[in-house]
Image (tube, grey):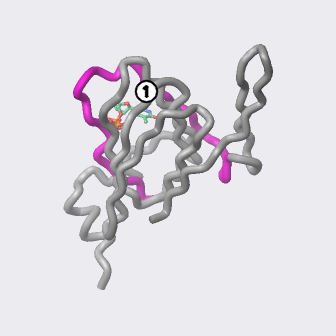
Amino acid sequence: MNIKLFPLQKHGDDRGSLIALEEGINVPFTVRRVYYMYETQKGVRRGFHAHKDLKQLVIAVRGSCRFLLDDGQEQIELLLDNPAQGLLVEAMIWREMYDFSEDCVLMVLADALYDESDYIRDKQAFLELTKKP
Ligand code: TYD
């Protein structure tokens, strides 16, 4: 599956921790947009889409949440619970996010501006597009 969960270098000292996100260094694309989700209500499951082209780097900068990722062939579930971990999600990956902790702040860096026409929100259509011959 076209995803990567990788460690982000921490610049910690006795004052605390600091992580830098740098284009071409630990962010493998040009960052055109950053957004974050927070105050996600208990029991909420969100996402339910794939992107035709968009690449994203997702970081739980606080708290935790679970991801279901599906490339049409294989499904994986993972827990994001560490601000020093980046989840790189390439295009054509169906994602659902759930089990948000109350304090969860989920930050997303993306390589394009918001564009509804890049979304695939119909799971059946996604499965058709990713079906192997
Ligand atoms: P939505 O796509 O429903 O979020 P998710 O798929 O993660 O559950 O987005 C929620 C709302 O925010 C929707 O009205 C679209 C809007 N939105 C923007 O305006 N800009 C953005 O960058 C994103 C991600 C969403």
Chain part drawn in magenta? 27-52
Q: Nearer the viewer, residue 63 or 125?
A: 63
* Rendered location of residue 72, percent (x, y): 31, 66
Say which quarter of the image contains residue 52.
bottom left
- For the point 32% across and 60% down, the residue is 75
In the rendered view, does 83 fall on the left or right side of 45?
Answer: right
Q: Residue at x 55, y 28 (%)?
A: 61
Q: Examine the image and state in which quarter residue 33 appears.
A: top right
Residue type (three-letter) at the residue carrying disc 1: Met
47 and 6: which is toward the camera: 6
Residue 3 x, y percent position in the rendering: 50, 57
The residue sitting at the bottom extreme is 133
Q: How many numbered markers are drawn? A: 1
Of the pair 48 and 41, the residue shown nearer to us: 41
SS at badge 1: strand
Task: Tell whether circle 1 marks a residue whose Cβ is less than 8 angstroms from ligand 1.
Answer: yes
126 left or right of 57 in image: left
Left or right position of 52 against 132? right
Within the displayed image, which quadrant is ligand 1 positioned in?
top left
Location of residue 88 in the rendering, given as x and y in whole percent from the top left corner: 54, 51
Position of residue 105 relative to residue 92, above or below, is above
Residue depicted at 58% across the width and 43% down the height: 86
Identify which residue is drawn at 32% across, 49% down: 49
Q: Label 1 belongs to which residue?
A: 37
Residue neighbourhood size for the residue with mark 1, other residues' Cα within 10 Å, grouped as few (<14), some (14–19), many (≥20) = few
- The vertical placement of 94 against 110, above or below, is below
